[in-house]
Structure formats: structure tokens, C-alpha cells
Image (cartoon, helix red, strand yellow):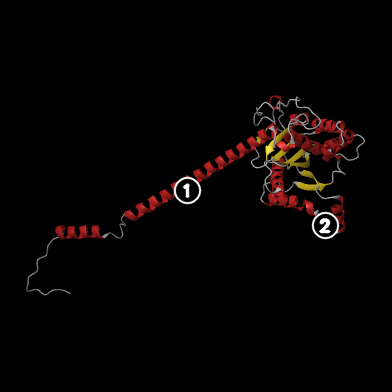
Amino acid sequence: MTTHPVAFVDEAFIRLHQHPGAYLFAAVLVDADDLADVIDAARHAAGHHEQFHASHLYRRGHIQPIEDMLDTTEAHAGWTLMIAQAPLGDHQETARQAALTQLLRQLNDQKVRDVVLDTRASPREQLDTQLQGRKINPSDLPDITTYRRLVRSQQINARMRLQHVDDRHQPALWLPDVTAWAFQRALVFDEPQWWSRVASVATIHDAATGRELSLTNDRTAPPTGERGPQIQSPSAQNSLSSSFYTLNGGTTNRTQGPGYLYNTLLTQAMEASSASSGIALQASIATLSANVDRLATAISATTQDCALPDPSHPGDADAGSLDAGSRVEAPTTHRDPSEPELG
């Protein structure tokens, strides 16, 4: 029996002063048959750390487990999907749900049946949910609402299941955690060296349009359509230099706004949105033109029908002609004046 991949998902976001920001989702696809090996590998990469959060480890100076987890992701991921909603916009929750919508659509295309998403509920909230006999944590309800909407509108398969899990209990969630962190680090600090460890098994998609984006230093985007879970073209892999390698600060100061890599990504997202709007406009114009043509044809046909005479009910002009002809061509009967008229 064919098994479907399982997607483990975590998020990261950029919300900084004088920065357009972004909401990011990382989904690491794992073969269901390989799940036990992936969990063991994640635990091994974490070392003596019982819990793994890349941002916490980085702040404490624990670099090695981060690198090991990225290498584990590269080795065990069937594929990795990054969804970027950029700019962030005024409402972070709106950005999250837009990114989640695109993510679930992409995972549906990859025949994913189980999506395991790191919960936003605190341990206290999870306990309260259990004590109250509820199935869904209040913090996770917006995600479930988005999921149900997509199922009802048949944008994703009803067989897809979305489950929120605490990453303290599921080491496989450490893979998307480190992946999202690495991508965030590249966009905030212009430090692509972390992302480069998983770039060969990953694609980036714009949340609004689904278009594939690229994170490169040489301003050359990989050919579209040549990368994915089924096709891993070496010629299309992101060429990320390690020349920016620093452990703190990178080449971009937070107070100076977005750096080069973020601006490159944002430009691509805006171009994708503009192209999508243009295509939608062209489609609307084509539909309108077709409707106008059909209306003109219908009006023309109606006008012609009104102009044609009905043989069974001749018009006044035709009737007059026939009467005149009758008077000319019909034989004349002469009556003697003394004969009486017949009524």
C-alpha cells in the first residue's frame, strides 16, 4: 500500500521597527515509513538538550546542535516547503492564515495526508483545554478554521488531517523549527549560511500567489519548474555563498531596516503579485469581451427576426401591393344599373 508523506510544520515571523516584516512557515516532508528514524536522528542532533528551539540555543551560544539539526533535515527530509508572506502587513494573524492557506494547498498537491503543526498554546492552556474536555486549544482555533474552510471549498482533500502538537513531545517538529529559524536569519541579518545547509532540498513559495521564489546572492533565480519533491535538479539549486558567515550581527543591523536578501525576496513577491493581477485582469477582459460578443450576436439576431415579414400575417405595405395587384389583374364584372346589389 502506498504511504503518504507526513508534513511537520513550524513558523517564524519578522516584526521589526522600520522593516516590512514577513510571516514564514516551514514544512518538512517525511516518509511515514521513515518517521522512527527521523525522530531518532533529531534526538541525536539535539545532543543533551531535551528540548530544541534554535533561537534559544543560538542566544545561549549553542551553535553545534543547530548545525547538526540542519544537517539532519537535509539528510532526512523528503522535501522542505517554505511559505513566505511578505510584507507582514498590519495584522499578523491575517498574515499567518494567508501563509497557512498557501501551505495547505501546496501540501495537498504533494498528496500529504497528515499535517503536524506546532501548537501555539502554552502548557497551561493545553492543560485547561484538557480539563474542560475540549479538543481544540483556543490559540489553535484560527488555524482549524482556515483548514475547515479549505476543505469545505474543496481546495484541499477532505482526507488531509491537521493536528496541533507540542514540540516538547514530538522531536520531528525540531526539523521545521531549525529550518524556519535559518530562513528568518537570512532575511533579517543577511546570513544565508544557515539556510544554505537545507537549500538543496527546499523550495520557497509566495503566500499570495504560490509562485516559487529564490534566495540567492548572485541575483539569479533558479529555473522554475525544475525543483520539487520529485525533481531535484543540481543546476537549479540555490547558490548561497558562505562569505557572510558570522555568529552575531551578520551584515545587516536591525535598526537599519531590511537587508539585501529580504529586499530580493520582497521584490520577487511583488512581481509575482503584479503578474498574477495582470493575468487576472486579462482573464476578466477576455471574459467581458466574450460576453459583449454574445450579447451583440443576440441583439443582432433579435433585430433580424423583427425585420423579416411573417408570411401568415403580411404587413401593411405588402397587403397594399396585393390589393393593388388584385385590382389590376382581376377580371372586371360589369353590372347593369338596373340590377339590384347583393348584400
Residue extending furthest toward the right: 48
**Residue type at the position of mark 1:** Asn
Image coordinates for residue 52, horizontal then vertical, percent:
86, 39
Q: Position of residue 114 (x, y in %)?
A: 78, 44
**Dividing the picture into quarters, in which one does residue 74 lie?**
top right
Disc 2 is placed on an element classified as loop
Residue 87: mark: none
In this rendering, which labeled residue sits more in front, label 2 or label 1?
A: 2
Classify residue 277 by image quadrant: top right
Q: Is residue 213 above or below residue 129?
A: above
- Residue position for label 1: 291
Element marked by disc 1:
helix
User: How would you rate the neighbour count of disc 2 (Cα within 10 Å): few for under 14, some for 14-19, many for 20 or more?
Assistant: few
Above or below, 147 relative to 72: below
The residue that mark 2 highlights is 134
Q: Residues within 10 Å of mark 1 (few under 14, many from 20)?
A: few
Name the quadrant of the N terminus.
top right
Residue 80 shows up from this direction: no
Q: Name the amino acid type tagged 2.
A: Arg
Q: Residue at x 85, y 52 (%)?
A: 126
In the image, residue 120 sits, relative to residue 35, either above or below, namely below
Q: Position of residue 102 (x, y in %)?
A: 69, 43
